[in-house]
Amino acid sequence: MNTKVDLHAHTTASDGLLTPSELVELALAYGLRLLAITDHDSTEGVAAALNHAAGTSLEVWPGVEISTDVPRAEVHMLGYFVDIEDSNFQEVLSRCRDSRIWRAQQMVLKLGELGMSLTFERVRQIAGTGSIGRPHVAQALVEKGYVSNLKEAFDLYLNRNGPAYVERFKLSPVEAVQLIKNAGGMPVLAHPTYINPGDGSGFDLSGFVHELTQTGLVGMECHYGDYSPETVRGLSKIAREFDLIPTGGSDFHGRGVHSADLGEPIIPDESIERMRAWRAAQ
C-alpha cells in the first residue's frame, strides 16, 4: 500500500493560493501523511507549516524550488531537507526573489505596451507577503478581463516565448545543485519533461541528467502532476540508469490551478524510504 504523500506543493510564501497553515489543514483533510513545502526561491512558509502540523498525523519536510536557466530553456531544481537557517543559502534566495520583483515590473510595462493596462501595485497586492511570480501577473490580467484564466495568460503572453516575458537572475542547474548541497539538502530535478528549448533541436535528457549526477543530483521527479503512465515509465528508466531516487508530487498551487490535486499522483513508498535513508546518512 502506498502512503498518500505530496512532495511538491506551494504556499502564499511564493505563488500558492493557500497559507502554510491552510495547506497543512487541506493535507490533513485529504489524509496525507507527508507533505513537502517547496515554494519558489523561498523557505518562508516552512516554519509555519511545521508549527501548524506539530502534534498531528502529518509530517512536513522543508523544501524549496529554485528556478535555473539553460540556453533557451528553464530548469527547476527541488531541494529537500535544506537548512533554512543557512545564511548563504538565504542570501542567494533573496537575490532570486529581488529579481522576481524587477521582472514583474518589466512585465507590467510590456503588457501596457501591448494595450493591457495593469499596475505593479496591484500585482504586489495579489502576491501579498509571498515571492512575486508570473502567476500573480497572470491573475491581474484575469481581474482586468484581458484573459479568461491563468492558463490563457501564460499561453498568450507570459510563457518563455510570449511577448511579455522578461528574463531575470537565475542560477545554472549545476549552481543550484551545489547551493542545495551546501545547505545540507537533497537536490532533485523537477518535472524534467518541461525542459524544452523550443528550437526544434530536441533535448537530450539522459545526457543532461548524467551531467547533473556528476555534481550531486540525488533524485528526479518521475511521478508528477498528470504524467501519463508511459511518461512515468520513461523517466523511471532514466532514474534507474543513474541510480536516482524517483520522486514526485502534484506541484499544487491551489485547487483548480493545475490539473493535479494535492496528494496526486501516487508516489511509491520505496521512493520515500530511499529519501529517508539518504537523509539519515548525512
Image (cartoon, rainbow, N blue to C red):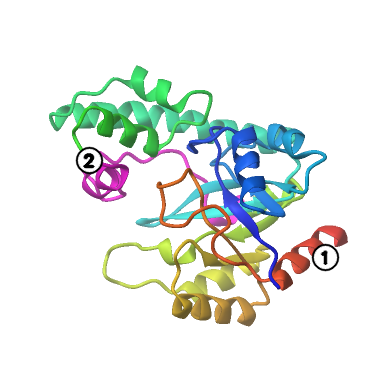
In the depicted structure, whether residue 238 falls above or below residue 109:
below
Kindly report which numbered mark, 1 or 2, lies closer to the viewer in this rendering.
2
Residue 194, label in figure: none
Indicate left or right for 159 with 181 as reference: left
User: What secondary structure is found at the residue carrying circle 2?
Assistant: loop
Q: Quadrant of the C terminus?
A: bottom right
Residue at point 13%, 29% (across, down): 115
Q: Say which amino acid is labelled 2.
A: Ser
Q: Position of residue 92 (x, y in %)?
A: 61, 36
- Compared across the picture, whether 118 is left or right of 41 comes to left
Q: Which residues are magenta?
A: 149-176
- Mark pair 1, 2: CA separation: 46 Å
Picture coordinates of residue 220, whole percent (x, y): 59, 66
Residue sitting at x 56%, y 79%: 238
Pick the quarter of the image with the N terminus: bottom right
**Residue 166 part of the magenta segment:** yes
Whether residue 108 appears in magenta in the rendering, the answer is no
Q: Give the camera-side residue of 80 and 55.
A: 55
Foreground pick, 248 / 265: 265
- Residue depicted at x 29% and y 20%: 119
From this view, report whether residue 258 is shown above or below residue 264.
Answer: above
Q: Is residue 37 visible?
A: no
**Helix, strand or loop at mark 1:** helix
Residue 23 screen position, x and y as percent: 60, 40
Question: Looking at the picture, how far across and down is residue 7, in whole percent?
Answer: 63, 55
Q: Residue furthest top?
A: 121
Give the residue pinned by disc 2. 148
Task: List the residue tagged with mark 1.
Answer: 277
